[in-house]
Amino acid sequence: MGHYLIFAAYIVFYCLVHSLLADPFILRDIYDKWWYRAFYVVQSVILLFPMIFFYFKLPNTHFFNPASPVKEILLVVFISALMFGLYAAKSYDNMSFFGIKQIKKYLDSGVEHFESHKELTSHGALKYVRHPYYFTGLVLLWSRPLFIKDLILNVVFSFYFILGSINEERKLKIIFGEQYRTYAENVPMLLPKFLNPLYWLKK
């Protein structure tokens, strides 16, 4: 039981660090520095290693291990969500996301600050859901057989994705104001239009 608590505590710690270091209103000027995004990505990856270590130290005790055809249906759902996540990646500036563009601009012309939110993007997957990565993450977490350790990971990360989307909404409303509020009225937050009965009832 103690090992499961340590595992859960570390996941919570990871999510808190990840959220705090992603908040431009907490970090202010540091957030827009040319080196910061690359640092953020690197530390996020490094902090995953203890989580992976704890995960593989825990026993593979089944919590949910469905038989056919449920297992095959879940596999289809998992692959579909993965494909949607890859499609969603086209909606973002990935060079900026990983910090490569910022470093290149600094090396080319000495630009020390890089504004990550210049204009509101609403094309591609963002036409269907406001937070496609969080939606994808939630589906990938739950559309598979689960060990008890997976259940712990899934519950913590599900809370993180939901709270993270709410926090992201707060930041985007501050940055884009009425433009984002209008966008939010027409696009669901976490459940895409094509799966969202509330959206179709509203229409």
Image: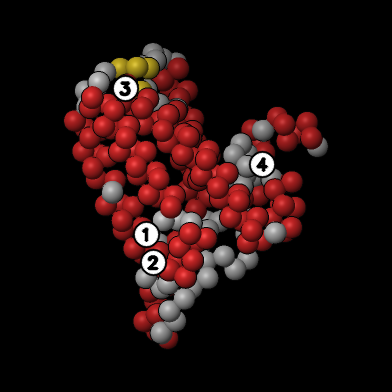
Q: Which residue is mark 4?
A: 188
Point out the image quarter for the N terminus: top left
Quarter where residue 27 is shown: bottom left
Of the numbered discs 4 and 3, the one sitting upstream in the chain is 3
Instruction: Point out the residue furthest to the left here.
Output: 57
Q: Which residue is mark 3?
A: 147
Describe the element under mark 1 as helix, strand or loop: helix
Instruction: Point out the residue furthest to the front here.
Output: 26
Kind of residue sitting beneath label 1: Tyr
Q: What is the CA distance from the residue labelled 2 to the residue labelled 4?
A: 31 Å
Of the numbered discs 2 and 3, the one sitting upstream in the chain is 2
Judge by depth and name the residue closer to the eye, 77 or 92: 92
Where is residue 61 drawn, in percent x and y? 26, 18
Kind of residue sitting beneath label 4: Pro
Q: What is the CA distance from the residue labelled 1 to the residue labelled 3?
A: 30 Å
Tell me if label 1 and label 4 are in contact, CB under 8 Å: no
Of the numbered discs 2 and 4, the one sitting upstream in the chain is 2
